[in-house]
Image: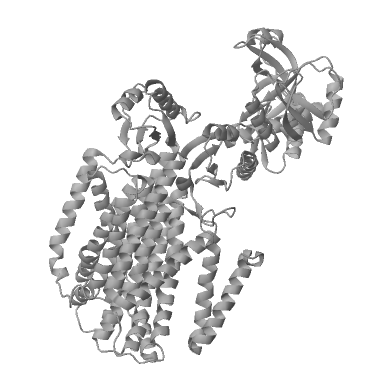
Amino acid sequence: MEIIKNPNYDFLGKAKYFIALSVFFILSGIAVMALRGIAYGVEFSGGTQLILRFQSTPEVDRIRSAVDAQGGGAVIQTYGDVKANKVLVRIAKEAPENDLDAPARAIRDALAKNYGQNPVLESSSEIVGPIVGAELRQKAVYLTVLGLLFQLIYIAARFKGGAWGVAAAVAGLHDILICLGFLTFFRYEITLNVIAALLTLVGYSVNDTIVVFDRVRENLAIRRKDALPKILNDSMNQTLTRTLISNGTTFLSVLGLFLFGGEVLRGFGFTMVIGILVGTYSTLFIAVPFVDWWYGRTGGYAPAAAPIAKAQGRAKATA
Amino acid sequence: MPPALQNPITLWLLLTAALAGIVYAFMRPELRWKAIVYGSFLLACGVAIWPPYDRGDQPGKIHLGLDLRGGIHLVLQVVVEDALNATVDDAVNTARDQAARKGIQVASVSRSSPTRLSVEGVEPARVKDMRDLLQDFFRANWEVRDAGEGRLTVQMTDLYQRQLKDQTVQEAIRTLERRVNALGVAEPVIAATGSRGDQILVQLPGVTDVEQAKRMIKTTAQLSLKLVENSAATQETLLQGVGGKLPDNMDLLQGPSDTPGQPTYYLVRKESMITGRDLKSARVGVDESNRPQINFALNALATDKFSRETGRNIGRQLAIVLDGTVYSAPVIQSKLGSDNRITSTRFTTQEADELAKILKAGALPATLRYLQQLTVGASLGRDSIRDGVMAAGAGMAFIVIFMLVYYRLSGLNAVVALAANLLILLGAMAYANATLTLPGIAGVILTIGVGVDTNVLVFERIREELRNGKTVRLAVQNGFERVWITILDTHATALIAAAFLFQFGTGPIKGFAVTLVIGLVANVFASYFVSKFIFEWVLGGRHFESLSI
């Protein structure tokens, strides 16, 4: 069984349309983020988040009127399966450092007093002081950038050319920006889990890019007469089946995560679903065209064939 | 199971021996060695996991993070300044005592910052003597400076400040460990965290009484017994008695009186007769009228000092001070020995019980501040497990079906590799005592995805080689060989990404990073080496015209 027989698409030729599409997505993403602002989860913004399990079906309006007496601006929504009787309550008000619990206690007390007929059976809480939130936000950006930088250096070293590393990093950055745009557009919060997903998908996207680059490296060593653009395009076609199958299966498993993984993993699943799609796309239409553009601009390409030549030699010797 | 097999190492050795027997009986000589090494490694993983979850009286080997089993996660900041202040205060006393002993007149000795003390108004003729004296006593770790006009400062060195900070955090961690043990929490995590190293992470899985746990953790529990100079209902009355200003060697503390809601103020000596460090034990008892009290015993050295001092001060009040509040101030009736008690009208039995445990665990060297608190209810954790397992199961079922349909018998090879991958992943996590968190389950799902990618890469390459007219054996060999570099590079970059994730250092995300890292390594072994071995085993020695791929 084969998905596509002998694929031969002109990826590079169509790249400019796709780059335009990417620019459109990134710019609209930035516009959405600028207009709405990025919604941070409680671990980054600081504040108090409670997940309350009630005895019977909770009435969000009654809960809101009970909680709003403690100062407005609370987010109140049904959490997870309706049958689970769970409600998420979040207040942005900063918890005082010497008594982090105070806002959470106030909410629980207010509910017990004004909505006593439906008592809270169990509660989970997440309370983040202002220092931690800011520190974590900083750390997230810092780690993402450093992670990309180190991957860039690794690839540049392995492929003996900065362009390959920069191409993979640009594609990774492209994926993060588009994902952030989607997350904001669909009103997902940037939680720790989402950051983890973003960092992972950078790894995944770079991973996907390397598979193609690796094929390019191999082809460059064998087909010394062909021009770089042709080799780039052929390499993408040669690895296309693999790209579709691998990313397809991973896509479906993270789709399972998004659909069945429960409320806590919803944002994570969403980011991965978008991320795998964008990561696959960015290999074909961002990373490889970038290499083409770079060497077309600087003129000429010195093939970095050493590692693969050795492997070829080994293969011949054992054959 | 017979007792000998209860020991995992024995069990593993026996299983490996059995495997070796089977391999020798049925496998071709050139494959035996690999089969035994790979097989016994997988067996070790299997033994490490068993039993995966709590089963009868055997605890499960897969540790669930507190986001899955419920519990408390706290990040505390150690107020290191407290410890610095205390150290400088000690130094202030030393400087004052030494000056007095040498007969040097000084106007005052005081702490001017958390890391510095200053001596003011030294008599002009003796400035040099005082300076030498200070230098003598504060040789290491301190720098003595002459600020002119009879003023000397002693500054803590940066190195010493860092040492003190580390010491304080370590001591706080040890104290918290003792207290948490008194709470009876299984598998707690108490560790330094944060970029500046002054934060402590406390994870108490399975704990549901948050309030009690927090009280137990936060109480500084600095106990001291101090002589009372005077007591009154208002601060003003007390201050009038000493000329309106609090003397250097005195403290003004608050405590309960017989009328509820009406505090009593105590003027006490700054110097403690005994402190929490002198305690040998502390436990709850009851007094004659059945009210809870805390019985405590002193160690030998402190007992000597205590009986000497109490003998000298019969008839005076002794304040029992905990964290800056007077609990009670009984009158010393007679010379006291090792065994004593604390009573207070304020105690409930639970309070007394907690206090005894805290006193036994020792005082915290500094105040703790809460930075972050996460509590997860048990039912939320159970829901998360169900959802996570469901998602992982759905993803895996899909991949298995796809691989079998698309790659047929070779797909079966990939499925075996996938199973080996999971076995290694879980075995390594069980062995390393790593915890499985909800994002960790997501990590397992991703690992499956990446694992399949390795197989797909190899299989597609084999198909390509076959299309180019290579024989089955050569196609398989070339397929694996050519893909090796790709796998190396993709896994290396993925490891880089995972390493940065690990740096996040917060509970669940760390669990995710750990799962990813182990998964990546397991993947190379399972989807590459094990899968290659299966091909060699099935194909080797015979001639095949075609391959089911």
Question: Which residue of the protein is positioned furthest toward the front in this rendering?
Answer: B1
Q: How is the image coloured?
A: one colour
Question: Is residue B443 positioned above or below B360 on the image?
Answer: below
At x 33%, y 39%, the residue is: A83
Q: Is residue A287 left or right of residue B67?
A: left
At x 45%, y 51%, the residue is: B437
The reply to whether residue A292 is visible in this rendering is yes
Q: Is residue B265 left or right of residue A89?
A: right
At x 53%, y 77%, the residue is: B37
- Of A14 and A243, the residue lying toward us: A243
Quadrant assignment, res B302: top right
Q: Is residue A41 left or right of residue B363?
A: left
The percent position of residue A74, horizontal first and vertical second, equals 33, 29
At x 84%, y 35%, the residue is: B300
> Quadrant of the image for the N terminus of chain A?
bottom left
- Of A89 and A211, the residue lying toward us: A89
Q: How many marks?
A: 0
> Quadrant of the image for the C terminus of chain A?
bottom left
The percent position of residue A291, horizontal first and vertical second, equals 24, 68
The reply to whether residue B123 is visible in this rendering is no
The percent position of residue B25, horizontal first and vertical second, equals 53, 86
The percent position of residue B71, horizontal first and vertical second, equals 50, 41
